[in-house]
Image (cartoon, rainbow, N blue to C red):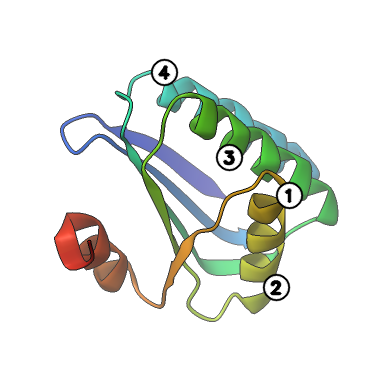
Amino acid sequence: MFSVEALVGKNRLVIRLWGVVTEEEALQIGDASLRALDRLRPGFDILSDLTGVTELPESGSGQIERVVEAARVRGFRRVVRVVGRSALAAVRFQRSSRNVGHEAYLAFSLEEAEQLLEGGWT
């Protein structure tokens, strides 16, 4: 399961994944993320919450790369990934991000991620 939301006022894309993410859902997540990116201005941030992911297909990496590349082209500023206990999902997302030349900041809770994005680093 997933949710994708463009927080226009904060200029932020929020992607939340939980449970078992199927190949079909991975494609839906990619499509929804690209639609949401169109609502944001250059300099936007991305917050992806993976804390509830129990399974992520290896083939989902292509969708991750698709979204990261589209965000890069549209001028994103930074990414914070909330990993919690989803080590496998975190590793796959990090590997896919590196494949397109990008690194994400990791957070262990949604609160920590929000603090980072609201000015907790320079």
Q: Position of residue 4 (x, y in %)?
A: 44, 39
The residue under label 4 is 38
- Front tag of 4 and 3: 3
Q: Please tell me whether mark 2 sits on a helix, a strand or a loop.
A: helix
Looking at this rendering, what residue extends furthest in the right direction?
59
Which disc, if any, is residue 68?
3
- Label count reads 4
Within 10 Å of disc 3 (Cα), the crowding (few <14, some 14-19, many 20+) is many
Q: Please tell me whether mark 4 sits on a helix, a strand or a loop.
A: loop
Badge 1 or badge 2: first in the primary sequence: 2
> Circles 1 and 2: CB distance less than 8 Å?
no
Disc 1 residue type (three-letter): Asn
Badge 4 or badge 3: first in the primary sequence: 4
For the C terminus, give its image quadrant: bottom left
Disc 3 residue type (three-letter): Val
Q: Please tell me whether mark 3 sits on a helix, a strand or a loop.
A: helix
Q: Position of residue 98 (x, y in %)?
A: 67, 55
Gap in angstroms between the C-alphas marked 1 and 4: 23 Å
